[in-house]
Amino acid sequence: MATRSDTAASPVEGGAAPGRPPKGPLPADKERRRRAKLSRRWQRDVRWSPYAFVSPFFLLFLAFGLFPLIYTGWASLHQVELTAPTDMNWVGLRNYTRIFDDDFFWNAAQNTLTIGIISTVPQLLMAMGIAHILNYKLRASTFYRVAMLAPYATSIAAASLVFVLLFGRDYGMINWALDFVGIDPVDWQGDKWPSQFAVSTIIIWRWTGYNALIYLAAMQAIPQDLYESAALDGASRWQQFLHVTLPSLRPTILFTVVVSTIGASQVFGEPLLFDANKGASGGAEHQFQTLGLYLYEQGWVNQHLGRASAIAWTMFLILIVIGIINHVISRRLRASS
């Protein structure tokens, strides 16, 4: 009797196929292509993602930094009024020669220099002393550090209005205290040097704590081994401060001096709000008008946009000179150390 295997027909050439091969690539080829596609996508992501992340900064810089800089440079070479900013008449360097021949410009430059010196020197000295005190272990040290930063976070308008009340001629607390000790009242807003001292006081109050925290961060980075070695050699705390702390803080001190100098050259809000008439003249006799106020007066009060642009570029060139001086001094300090 024939078995089932005996009766099964054997496949012959040209007969029916046992099954169709699967369509498309094999699983191994499909996985390899998928991985290659992901690899190319990953490479593009690694290459272009950093540019996408930093692009918002460059877009904002182009819109609000580079374009105004180029436009003011172009406008400074033209006679143009704020009421008709598209009507430009080429005058070359006439706007620059006019501001250099203007006595009010040199008065504003002198006021900016004196206010900068009066505000920067005491500010940095006080910041150094406060940072040196906070560098020791104190109770509630975090509270004191936050308190040092509070004036910096305060609005310029609010701080200036408070100081206007303090330095009032007839009702101010400062004159009340002077009268209490037998000193005649001072016209803090009408006289030149008292008004500049009052404006500088506002700047000192706002920025001392900020610089103190910068100095404190630099002090905490100084190795304690240096202080221990100086103490073993018999150095007092004052000698440690002179011979260990100050030399280690030279780069930080230079940084704060440069930043404070740049900030002093751009002082605007404090003298504007300190003026009793709330104008841009910096007092009745321009006694505390800074370069920032002079620029504002020419551009937005007198509506001379071309002249204001020339003043802005002059201030920009002054800042470039300050930056070059900072670079030269920094290189010499690094070479000496």
Image (cartoon, helix red, strand yellow):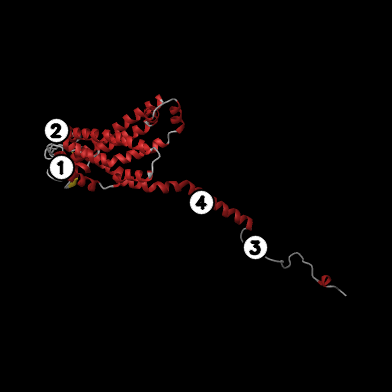
In primary-sequence order, the first of circles 1 and 3 is 3
Say if mark 1 contacts mark 4, CB within 8 Å. Answer: no
In primary-sequence order, the first of circles 2 and 3 is 3
Task: Name the residue: 15% across, 37% down.
Answer: 181
Say if mark 2 contacts mark 3, CB within 8 Å. Answer: no
Tell me if mark 1 has few (under 14), some (14-19) or many (20+) residues whose alpha carbon lies within 10 angstroms of its own: some
The answer to whether residue 152 is visible is yes
Amino acid type, label 4: Arg
Residue 193 x %, y %:
16, 34
Amino acid type, label 3: Pro
Which type of secondary structure does the marked residue at label 4 adopt?
A: helix
What is the quadrant of the N terminus in the image? bottom right
Residue 256 x %, y %:
33, 35
Mark number for residue 22? Answer: 3
Q: Which residue is mark 1?
A: 176
Q: CA distance from mark 4 to mark 2?
A: 64 Å
In primary-sequence order, the first of circles 2 and 1 is 2
Q: Quadrant of residue 149?
A: top left
Question: Of discs 2 and 1, which sits in the foreground?
Answer: 1
Residue 153 x %, y %:
30, 47
Residue 38 x %, y %:
54, 52
Which type of secondary structure does the marked residue at label 1 adopt?
A: helix
Q: Quadrant of residue 175?
A: top left
